[in-house]
DNA sequence: GTCTATATAGGGATAGAC
DNA sequence: GTCTATCCCTATATAGAC
């Protein structure tokens, strides 16, 4: 049952971290919730950092897959829309990382570096997608405008969850976040691309 | 010297919180830094929460002044630019609040409510300024576009500091943040307003 | 107001039996 | 693999002398 217990620890820790924030959940609390002993938990994960890192491994693996999906053809609006939904669903599942991001990055240096990698990939993906749209004349933005848009996409993608929590305090809303990022791009769209997005927006509202 | 010590505690705590994050700075650490005893510190602030709240009082007071500055005339681009600089300088001075915002709001409920008030005022100010621009035909945005812009302004204004810390790890850059928020508005500007902003952008770069 | 000393509590982590 | 028991350490906060 070793593998099983290890897995159950990961699941329970993830649920508690997401619900109450990693800084507010002790290893003892996780053990309690599982009705196992603290010693047992520390047998599977010697330190709390090990536990967090294992969760981050899973998250990182999924995000890298999403962000480095091979592009067989130039991307379109629907591709962006889909990517955002998948990415934001995943972020929602590991929201404890985003809830206390700066604190986690400060306390666990390895995690900070790896998160930077995800952020870099995010911005590369955003740039690639936008450049496809520009090449297809569905988008019109100067190089400096594009830089600003990409930085804003990265920022909103990283902190929509924390913002929702502080501002609204209702549940996780990946769909709203996707729309929020889309609204960063929409003013630069031209022709039928803009019409298409407007249709999507009306459908959403 | 009572008033003096109290003030020195506030200043030292602010500096340490800003540098290392509130969760990572103990009350003993603050006392050490000041070369006073922990007991003395707790004489002036019975709990750590009291200390944080006193710092938040100062911050809130300054932000409310900035955000509720009386408008004698319709706002222009330069007014927005100026407001952003002043607000972001202040945020930089109290950056510990923004570094661990969700955690602080989770642990101190009163602080959460008061921060929501600041956020609400921020969005009202953003809306008011944008509506002035629209009325002056310097900006063109549909109601739903305006809603999205305002939400994004609030989000970027709240988390630019955390984003910088995670992404760049260099110092606090209120000027860059102001430009980043401006770039949310710029695609909706028309005519000479857009030209003017482009000039500011080039001057900045 | 300030100090020294201490209480209280809790978190992370280990040892060793089973 | 799992448990019980416990250690070590740190954090917040208080008591009482000066």
Image (cartoon, coloured by chain):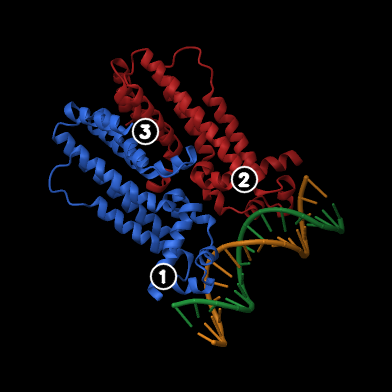
Chain colours: A blue, B red, C orange, D green
A38 vs A77, left or right, is right
Would you call the spot at circle 2 few (<14 residues within 10 Å), some (14-19), or many (20 or more)?
some
Secondary element type, mark 2? helix
| Label number found at residue B12 | 2
Characterize the local packing of mark 1: few (<14), some (14-19) or many (20 or more) Cα atoms within 10 angstroms.
Answer: some
Image coordinates of residue B163 in percent, x first then y, are 40, 43
Of residues A174 and B11, the one drawn nearer to the viewer in this rendering:
A174
User: Of the residues under marks 2 and 3, which one precedes in the sequence?
Assistant: 2
Residue ID at (53%, 58%): A25
Q: Distance of mark 1 from mark 2, alpha carbons?
A: 44 Å
Camera-side residue: B204 or B84?
A: B84
Instruction: Using a 10 Å C-alpha cutoff, classify the residue at mark 3 as few (fewer than 14 neighbours), some (14 to 19) or many (20 or more).
Output: some
What residue is rendered at 29% in x and 35% in y? A182
Q: Which mark is residue B180?
A: 3
Q: Which chain carries label 3?
A: B
**Which callout, 1 or 3, points to the residue nearer the camera?**
1
Left or right relative to D5: residue B125? left
Q: Residue A6 carries which label?
A: 1
> Is label 2 or label 3 in front?
3
* Label 1 vs label 2, nearer the camera: 1
| Residue B37 visible at all | no
Q: Is residue A194 left or right of residue A73?
A: right
């Amino acid at each position: 049952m070793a593998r099983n217990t290890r897995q159950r620890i990961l699941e329970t820790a993830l649920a508690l971290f997401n619900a109450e924030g990693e800084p507010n959940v002790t290893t003892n609390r996780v053990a309690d919730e599982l009705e196992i002993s603290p010693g047992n938990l520390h047998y599977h994960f010697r330190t709390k950092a090990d536990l967090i890192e294992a969760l981050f491994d899973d998250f990182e693996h999924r995000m890298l897959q999403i962000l480095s999906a091979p592009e067989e053809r130039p991307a379109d609006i629907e591709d962006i829309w889909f990517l955002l939904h998948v990415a934001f669903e995943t972020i929602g599942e590991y929201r404890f990382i985003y809830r206390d991001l700066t604190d986690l990055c400060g306390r666990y240096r390895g995690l900070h570096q790896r998160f930077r990698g995800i952020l870099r990939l995010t911005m590369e993906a955003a740039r690639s997608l936008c450049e496809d749209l520009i090449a297809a004349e569905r988008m019109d933005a100067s190089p400096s405008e594009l830089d600003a848009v990409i930085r804003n996409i990265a920022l909103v993608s990283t902190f929509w969850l924390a913002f929702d929590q502080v501002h609204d305090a209702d549940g996780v809303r990946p769909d709203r976040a996707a729309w929020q990022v889309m609204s960063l791009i929409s003013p630069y769209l031209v022709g039928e691309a803009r019409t298409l997005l407007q249709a999507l927006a009306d459908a959403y509202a």
